[in-house]
Amino acid sequence: MAYHADSSDLDGKEVLTWDLFGTAGRELAQTIADSGFEPEIIIAVARGGLLPAGHLSYALGVKLSDAINVEFYTDVATTLPDPVLLEPLLDTNALKGKRLLVVDDVADSGRTLALVLELLSQQGAECRSAVIYAKSASVVDPDYVWRRTDEWIVFPWSDEPPVTPNV
């Protein structure tokens, strides 16, 4: 069974440990705070953005958060033709005029982040984006980036296959 981070055959990769994730989140939060931007709501791009968004929510003291579900990657270096919004859909009606921080783990191609930012901006929200990693090929240059790399990234939350029942 293949899983998202099954990158054992890749020579070059960036490995984010849980400890380094803690550091990354705090440093990214400090960069956001120092910029003067004060988000009212943090929107996670699920699934990869869920943990970084939660970390930033606590680090920035922002209690309102939500998620938008998007599928793009299906395996290591394998994507769908285009990112696809999945149900349940985010209730975008309440976002008009709000300051949103859209959070994902990585801006790889940037197409997922571009889709989400366009959708939320069309609702009249002020959107900024934050990622742990950004790659040079991304069509979006996120507003806040902890580190830039062009390597495959192994995240601590997806570095092992899903658990299965013990039989």
Image: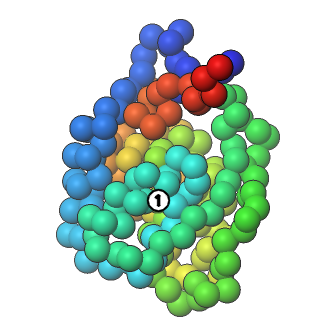
Residue 139 is situated, as x and y percent measured from the top left of the image, at: 57, 49
Which corner quadrant holds the C terminus? top right
Side of 153 where 89 appears, left or right: right
Could you tell me which residue is drawn at 53 percent across and 41 percent down?
108
Q: Is residue 20 visible?
A: yes
Task: Judge the density around disc 1: few (<14), some (14-19), many (≥20) Cα neighbours within 10 Å.
Answer: many
Q: Along the horizontal axis of the image, is 123 left or right of 63?
A: right
According to the picture, the residue beneath numbered tag 1 turns out to be: 103
- Classify residue 6 as left or right of residue 99: right
Q: Is 109 placed above or below 120 here?
A: above
Q: Amino acid at mark 1?
A: Val
41 vs 80: above or below: below
- Residue 2 image offset from top left, x and y in percent: 66, 21
Q: Look at 52% across and 61% down and name the residue there.
A: 44
Q: Measured from the top left, where is residue 106 in percent x and y?
A: 48, 45
Q: Quadrant of residue 55?
A: bottom left
Residue at (50, 12) in percent of width and height? 8
Secondary element under disc 1, as helix, strand or loop, is: strand
Question: Who's the residue at 40% across and 43% down the image?
Answer: 133
| Image vertical order of residue 25 relative to residue 125, above or below | above
Residue 141 in view (yes/no): no
Quadrant location of the N terminus in the rendered image: top right
Answer with left or right where residue 24 lies relative to residue 151: left
Q: How is the image coloured?
A: rainbow
Residue 27 at x, y percent in the picture: 22, 53
